[in-house]
Amino acid sequence: MLNSSNPEAGPLQDPVSLNVGGELYTTTLATLTRCPDSMLGAMFTGRLPLARDGRGRCFIDRDGRVFRHVLNFLRSDTLDLPRGFGELALLRREADFYQIRPLMEALGRLEVGATGGALLSAEVDRQARTLHFNLKRAPETYELCACAVTVFSARLFCTSAPFLQLLCRRLSYRGRDGAAPPQPDPGRPHRLRLEWTPRPDELPPEQYGKQRYRELSAVDPLGGPPRDVPDTSALLEELLALALAEGFRLDAVSPVDAAVLDACSLRLVRH
């Protein structure tokens, strides 16, 4: 019998007893919340409801045997799998369910390392904001104005640093400081973060530049005019076109029922 709101269970404290699919584990809150943005982090910081079994142990209805590898990764930040481990697909599915990004990336590196290929993942987001600004109407007269802007962002990870460098050469920021290609994170050549904000018609160019916003465009390798990248769908279209031309294939889309260009995240592999 499970209870997701047992008042007698009391607040969580170390050591924490877990029942994962019938397998029993004991660990600490620090280990379970090592990745605060993961689903485990949300469960054990009270942001998601937590079920209990009949003996008051925290219950998770997932594969219990493979959870030991999830737990060991959180303890050591290292993926140590036994020789001949044959459940990589299952472990990757569990890592995806728990949304433990470092584990997902470690599994990706392991999988592509075994094939000599490459892994590419992309996560995109958008945030609507209201910008307030003063508009000069006359030498001594200003009007307080507001307009909606949308800030788009993308986080990319690729085990092939040359591919990210190629992608950077295909993209260009445009802002008050001129045009410049994006660059991978300093000291982390396998990661690239993009952020851009198209200028709304109602936002004067001088106010747009004052906010240090930047637009994003895609460079035509054949020398044609650059193409605007107005949103994340356009970015994913550019990314897919380049990745498929470089030998990648689409491996996963999230959410699973989303159209590819409307997805929140994509994973591609090259063998």
Image (tube, rainbow, N blue to C red):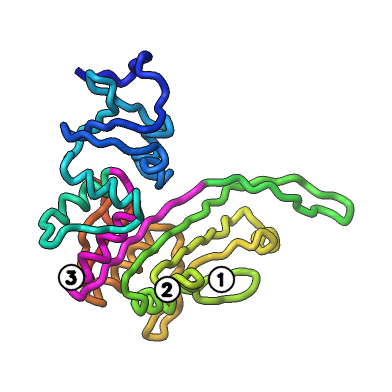
Quadrant containing the N terminus in the rendered view: top left
The part of the chain drawn in magenta is: 98-127
Q: Residue 46: percent from the left, percent from the top?
A: 42, 30
Q: Does residue 120 appear to the left or right of 155 in the view shown?
A: left
| Mark positioned earlier in the residue sequence (2 or 1) | 1
User: Where does label 1 land, which residue?
Assistant: 174
Nearer the observer, disc 2 or disc 1?
2
- Kindly report the distance in space between the C-alpha atoms of the residues bearing marks 2 and 3: 21 Å
| Mark positioned earlier in the residue sequence (2 or 3) | 3
Image quadrant of residue 36?
A: top left
Residue 216 in magenta stretch: no
User: At numbered mark 2, what does the secondary structure look like: helix, strand or loop?
Assistant: loop
Q: Residue 170: percent from the left, percent from the top?
A: 41, 77
Q: Which amino acid does label 2 sit on?
A: Pro
Q: Which amino acid does label 3 sit on?
A: Ala
- Kindly report the distance in space between the C-alpha atoms of the residues bearing marks 2 and 1: 22 Å
Q: Residues within 10 Å of mark 2 (few under 14, many from 20)?
A: some
Instruction: Find the residue positioned furthest to the right.
Output: 140
Residue 122 in magenta stretch: yes
Looking at the picture, does residue 25 appear above or below residue 144?
above
Q: How crowded is mark 3: few (under 14 residues within 10 Å), some or many (20 or more)?
A: few
- Kindly report the distance in space between the C-alpha atoms of the residues bearing marks 3 and 1: 40 Å
User: At numbered mark 1, what does the secondary structure look like: helix, strand or loop?
Assistant: strand
User: Where does label 3 land, which residue?
Assistant: 114
Image quadrant of residue 17?
A: top left
Front residue of this view, candidates 159 and 10 = 10
Q: Does residue 183 appear to the left or right of 259 in the view shown?
A: right
Front residue of this view, candidates 81 and 238 = 81
Name the residue at 35% across, 27% down: 49
Q: How crowded is mark 1: few (under 14 residues within 10 Å), some or many (20 or more)?
A: some
User: Where does label 2 land, which residue?
Assistant: 189
